[in-house]
Amino acid sequence: MTKVMPLAKRGISNSRLALGCMPFGGGWDAEPFTEQHVKEAEAAVEAALSIGITMFDHADIYTKGKAEQVFGRVLQARPDLREQIVIQSKCGIQLGEGDLPGRFNFSKEHILHSVDGNLERLGIDYLDVLLLHRPDPLVEPEEVAEAFAKLKSSGKVRYFGVSNMSASQIKFLQQAIPDSFAINQLEMSLNHLHFVDHVVHVNQQAGTEVNFAEGLMEYCRTEDIQLQAWSPLAQGKFSGRDIKDEPKHIQQTAQLVQQMAADKETTAEAIVLGWLMYHPAMIQPIIGTSNPERIKACADAERQASLMTRDEWYTLYVSARGTLLP
């Protein structure tokens, strides 16, 4: 049975991987970006395009706006590129400043202001997708709906989605918003297994320790909401990072990944991502690196997902969780 990504069903993108641009632009400080940062971003984008990645993930807060500015410089140097790629960004988080703490803001005013900032920094006329970054406990769905309607009618945003939200939070927003959400971006990886654990631990004591919203995977699949995985490579824990201080089961899983990669004549990154992409939800990993070689090491991920067996998938899952299934 041939499966199709929810994003492809909506005509948004068929890019099985996306590049997360959070590292672009230097540090999360007031220091301006440099020409070297622009060159690094250009190299990362070129590496991504070379392996078929045509979707790029941003947020207004990434390196305090510098990530989008640097990406804008890349687009400026290649004006033909904009119509060949899909750009998504996020809003809704306000970083701490002065006496104010970090906070969330889904007010109409903040959403509209944020998108204007996204577009200005990126140097573009529209976002393909806008995500609400993290849930705001003070949200008024009708206010979000007004902001989205204005953004869509003005042509500034084509599609909308969310990040780090439960099924109930999505439903709460959707009752006021006519456009169905296209995306929900969540942390999922061999190191963050709760999206699987919440299924296998139903009616078990171990389920009380699972930090994942009940029914979220099933809801997103039913509603054709694209599940995107942030930090899918788990910061290299299974694909080359020094992990001598990690728990034994993490070290053993890294060894297992390396052995599978050698046996299949591929990279450890392709195995780690292939495991995630094997899931029937057609998860789209957001690769969070700007290293061109590491980006290219992910090229074989989709093929490895198609070649992976159910037994191999469960072997990696059980190894990574560190305890046997009942």
Image: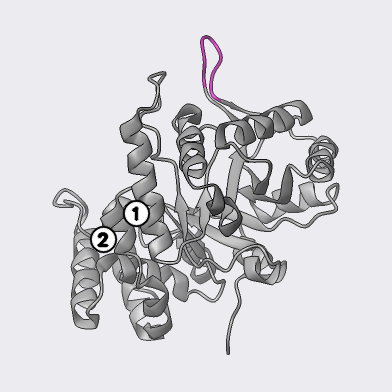
On the image, numbered disc 2 is attached to which residue?
Answer: 238
> Is there a contact, CB below 8 Å, between mark 1 and mark 2?
yes
| Residue 154 found in image quarter | top right
Residue 264 location (% of width, % of height): 24, 82
Whether residue 138 is visible, yes or no, is no
| Residue 299 found in image quarter | bottom left
- Magenta stretch: give its range: 96-102
On the image, numbered disc 1 is attached to which residue?
Answer: 234
Q: CA distance from mark 1 to mark 2?
A: 7 Å
Is residue 4 or residue 192 the one in the foreground? 4
Q: Amino acid at mark 1?
A: Ala
Lateral position of residue 144 relative to residue 40, left or right: right
Q: Residue at x 24, y 66 (%)?
A: 253
Residue 185 location (% of width, % of height): 56, 53
Is residue 107 or residue 5 the one in the foreground? 5
Badge 1 density bin: few <14, some 14–19, many ≥20, Cα 10 Å: some
Q: Residue at x 58, y 90 (%)?
A: 1
Whether residue 198 is visible, yes or no, is yes
Residue 34 location (% of width, % of height): 35, 28
Q: Secondary structure at mark 2?
A: loop
Magenta stretch: includes residue 63: no
Residue 112 location (% of width, % of height): 74, 31
Looking at the image, is 62 positioned above or below residue 210?
above
Colouring of the image: one colour
In the image as oriented, which residue stretches furthest toward the top?
99
